[in-house]
Amino acid sequence: MKTKTITIIILTLTLYKCGPSNEETKAKKAKDDSITFALNAVNTARESEEKAMKAAADSLAKLASNADNTGYAFEQNVELTGTLSKSAGGVMETIDNFYVLELTSPIDVTAPNADYETQKNVDEIQIGFNSDSVSNPDALLNSKITVRGDLYGQQTIHDHRSVLMNSAVVK
């Protein structure tokens, strides 16, 4: 009987030795968990880096496409390029025909004082021509032109755009 008991104990110890101990299992799981955590952290960092790179690229593209967007203010003499068109509009019973410059790229116009509101992404402005420099503005319709003049905001019922240029001179 002693031999049988000793054999069973030896066999049990052998089986126990062959398989991983509880501490070994815990250590392996902890190591696997650490590796999984590290891989997830790397993937998260990579995704964050990709998002940051995309945001930076988008910002640079926006800056490049809107390079003309800075430096404009109301009551400032500026030069703008776009396509000339004619429009009509009015308030109450007054109908006005007026010229519009459809800008090549949108602009922002800052308000230097409380008389105006800053305007963002302006893609067209109302034009009032200087009759000394442009005797027949209709001849310029649907043409790409560059005009120079002072920017100002809506002030009367005859102002049909948020940004206007009066006494514009064609360059």
Image (cartoon, grey):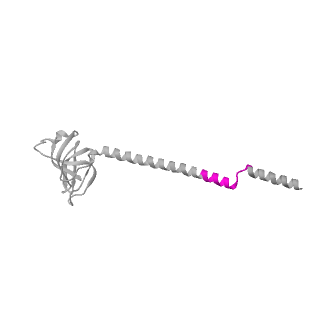
Percent position of residue 100, x then y: 22, 46
Point 51% across, 48% down: residue = 42
Q: Residue furthest left?
A: 132
Left or right, 163 with reference to 19:
left
* Main SS category, magenta section: helix
- Residue 74 percent location from the top left of the image: 20, 53
Q: Quadrant of the C terminus?
A: top left
Q: Position of residue 130 (x, y in %)?
A: 13, 46
What's drawn in magenta, residue-wise? 18-32
Magenta stretch: includes residue 29: yes
Asked if the magenta segment contains residue 25, the reply would be yes
Residue found at x 87% / y 53%: 4
**What percent of the width, then of the height, locates residue 73?**
21, 52
- Tell which of 16 and 139 is nearer to you: 16
Q: Quadrant of the N terminus?
A: bottom right
Observer-nearest residue: 25 or 64?
Answer: 25
Q: Residue at x 31, y 46 (%)?
A: 63
